[in-house]
Image (spheres, grey):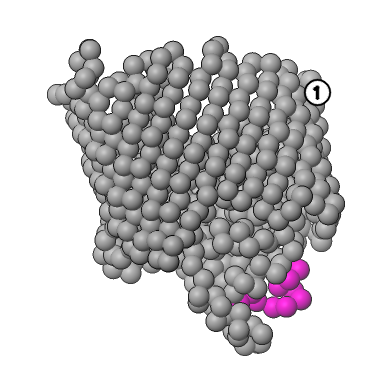
């Protein structure tokens, strides 16, 4: 049976990076994410997670799965041995076919071989060096960055990241994070920078958190607990550890930056999970309760005042999800509801400060080797006034070539628009994407954000403002098995502005070494 499953694995095709990230994060577009999230997924893409060797603590802290999914995976491995294909992974409780497809770019399934054979633990080294220069008028600026990661299989890792920017020229020590993963009672130990994300984010959630209006999935969080980080923008610095005792886990940490101790206890069952988290000045309890096709979740926290969130999730059929939640935090009442289907999603959000709504339709059409993916997104936001947005995209992919066009129209203080078109070669050792953009945005409140390709580890979402055009060329060159180069050249000019604005030319080069 497993031989057949292994053969089926060879026939499977992994989704592209952007599609996989959007599915796993639940974001409706790449503009909804942040730099830290993209850094984490790029690191996993470069050095995928071995699902046959990872401990429960390692699986959860990766951010790829919930505590329940990690427990299901470990139970399957204990009963059936190594997972030999992603087809077999789809049989594990909590792993739907779409979810398994999205995991492919960030995971691997390495078998230990015949019974009794000792697994080989390999040392991996990944080094990234980047440099960029930007010229605007008579001024030229430079910035640099470096990332290094050493990993001993799935048992230990060391991260070191540092960079400066055009606005901050200082190049400091940066981020340093070391972790050791255990096998029995010890989940992990971390020294240096770390992340701490528990419950629904009311009590403790370091770094970026998607807003509930950005997608249906953003209304319900999966805490990753304590985890090491190689982010350029870490949240906590100190020491952390977690321990596992069957279905129970205990976590503790101390952050020197905030002089903050953290303690957490959690229980993971088949249909019920719960946790208690305490830190300086706050204590919170969270839970998730699952029934067939229905889930209830929530968190309640006291930090000098009561905060709470309560949500309901319903799966009426495969691929369809309805969710609603109510939250009161920082004195702000909020409520949201949404629906997500195979090619349709919609969210309505309300708080005492603003109201938002969006709807997205993105079917996918296959005609032999050609895949056509149209997309339409409509959004409305009322804060100080109304902001209405309409976005249409059309993408065609055939063999190793792609073509994508996008039109944005925004009505706020005035009417602004942006059109861009991108063509690219997506396969082979040399990859390249050429993008041309034309825009007219006369008011700052009407600015349009557009996610653009860049070197791995760089999150590039410029805000277009003014009247002009832009051109960019981005890509990669796989020099050898262990060596790769990434590049981006961009130019933007404002020839139709009433007030002169200097054009900008930027060049980025990044080298990647993997041993």
Q: Secondary structure at mark 1?
A: strand
Residue 114 placement: quadrant: bottom right
Give the quadrant of residue 359. Answer: top right
Point out the stretch of residues depicted in magenta.
74-84
Was residue 497 drawn as part of the magenta stretch in this picture? Answer: no
Q: Is residue 476 visible?
A: no
Residue at the farthest front position: 367
The quarter of the rendered structure image containing the C terminus is bottom left
Above or below, 188 relative to 162: below
Residue 267: horizontal and vertical position, in percent? 82, 51
Q: Which residue matches tag 1?
A: 306
Secondary structure character of the magenta stretch overall = helix
- The residue positioned 60% from the left and 84% from the top of the image is 4
Quadrant showing the N terminus: bottom right
- The answer to whether 465 appears left or right of 303 in the picture is left
Residue, x 33% and y 34% (percent of image)? 419
Q: Tell me how many marks there are.
A: 1
Q: In the image, is 203 to the left or to the right of 118?
A: right
Q: Is 107 rendered above or below residue 129?
A: below
Instruction: Name the residue furthest left.
Output: 138
**Could you tell me residue 333's position as x and y percent?**
73, 21
Q: Residue at point 69% right, 49% down?
A: 320
Quick one: label 1, few (<14), some, or many (20+) residues within 10 Å? Answer: few
Q: Vertically, is 395 above or below 398?
A: above
- Specify whether residue 515 is in view: yes
Q: Is residue 75 magenta?
A: yes
Q: Nearer the viewer, residue 13 or 303?
A: 13
Place of residue 461 in the rendered image (x, y in percent of width and height, measured from the top left) = 40, 35
Is 232 or 313 nearer to us in this picture? Answer: 313
Closest to the observer, 377 or 308: 377
Counting from the top left corner in percent of width and height, residue 448 is at 40, 27
Q: Is residue 329 left or right of residue 353?
A: right
């Amino acid at each position: 049976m497993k031989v057949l499953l292994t053969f089926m694995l060879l026939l499977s095709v992994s989704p592209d990076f952007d599609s996989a990230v959007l599915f796993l994060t639940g974001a409706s577009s790449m503009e909804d994410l942040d730099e830290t999230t993209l850094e984490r997924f790029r690191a996993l893409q470069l050095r995928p997670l071995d699902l046959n060797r990872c401990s429960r603590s390692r699986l959860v802290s990766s951010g790829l799965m919930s505590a329940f999914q990690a427990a299901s995976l470990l139970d399957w491995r204990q009963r059936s041995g190594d997972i030999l294909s992603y087809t077999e992974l789809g049989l594990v409780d909590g792993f739907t076919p779409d979810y398994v497809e999205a995991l492919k770019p960030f995971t691997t399934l390495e078998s230990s071989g015949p019974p009794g054979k000792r697994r080989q633990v390999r040392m991996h080294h990944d080094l990234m060096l980047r440099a960029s220069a930007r010229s605007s008028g008579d001024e030229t600026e430079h910035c640099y960055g470096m990332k290094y990661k050493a990993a001993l299989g799935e048992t230990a890792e060391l991260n070191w990241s540092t960079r400066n920017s055009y606005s901050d020229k200082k190049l400091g020590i940066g981020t340093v994070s070391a972790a050791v993963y255990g096998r029995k009672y010890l989940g992990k130990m971390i020294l240096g920078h770390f992340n701490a994300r528990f419950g629904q984010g009311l009590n403790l959630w370091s770094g970026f958190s998607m807003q509930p209006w950005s997608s249906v999935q953003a209304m319900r969080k999966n805490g990753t607990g304590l985890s090491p980080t190689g982010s350029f923008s870490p949240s906590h610095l100190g020491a952390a550890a977690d321990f596992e005792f069957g279905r129970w886990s205990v976590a503790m940490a101390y952050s020197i930056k905030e002089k903050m101790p953290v303690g957490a206890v959690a229980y993971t069952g088949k249909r019920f999970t719960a946790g208690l988290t305490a830190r300086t000045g706050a204590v919170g309890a969270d839970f998730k309760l699952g029934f067939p096709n229905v889930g209830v979740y929530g968190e309640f926290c006291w930090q000098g005042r009561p905060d709470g969130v309560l949500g309901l999730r319903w799966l009426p059929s495969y691929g369809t999800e309805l969710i609603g939640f109510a939250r009161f935090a920082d004195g702000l009442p909020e409520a949201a509801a949404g629906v997500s289907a195979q090619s349709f999603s919609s969210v309505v959000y309300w708080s005492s400060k603003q109201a938002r709504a969006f709807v997205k339709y993105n079917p996918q059409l296959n005609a032999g080797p050609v895949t056509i993916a149209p997309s339409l997104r409509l959004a409305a936001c009322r804060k100080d006034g109304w902001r209405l947005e309409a976005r249409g995209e059309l993408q065609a992919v055939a063999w190793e070539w792609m073509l994508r066009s996008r039109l944005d129209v925004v009505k706020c203080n005035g009417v602004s628009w942006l059109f861009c078109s991108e063509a690219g070669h997506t396969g082979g050792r040399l990859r390249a994407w050429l993008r041309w953009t034309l825009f007219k945005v006369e008011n700052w409140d009407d600015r349009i954000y557009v996610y653009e390709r860049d070197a791995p580890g760089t999150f590039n979402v410029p805000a277009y403002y003014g009247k002009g055009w832009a051109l960019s060329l981005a890509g990669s060159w796989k020099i050898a098995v262990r060596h790769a180069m990434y590049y981006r050249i961009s130019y933007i000019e404002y020839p139709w502005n009433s007030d002169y604005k200097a054009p900008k030319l930027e060049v980025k080069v990044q080298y990647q070494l993997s041993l």
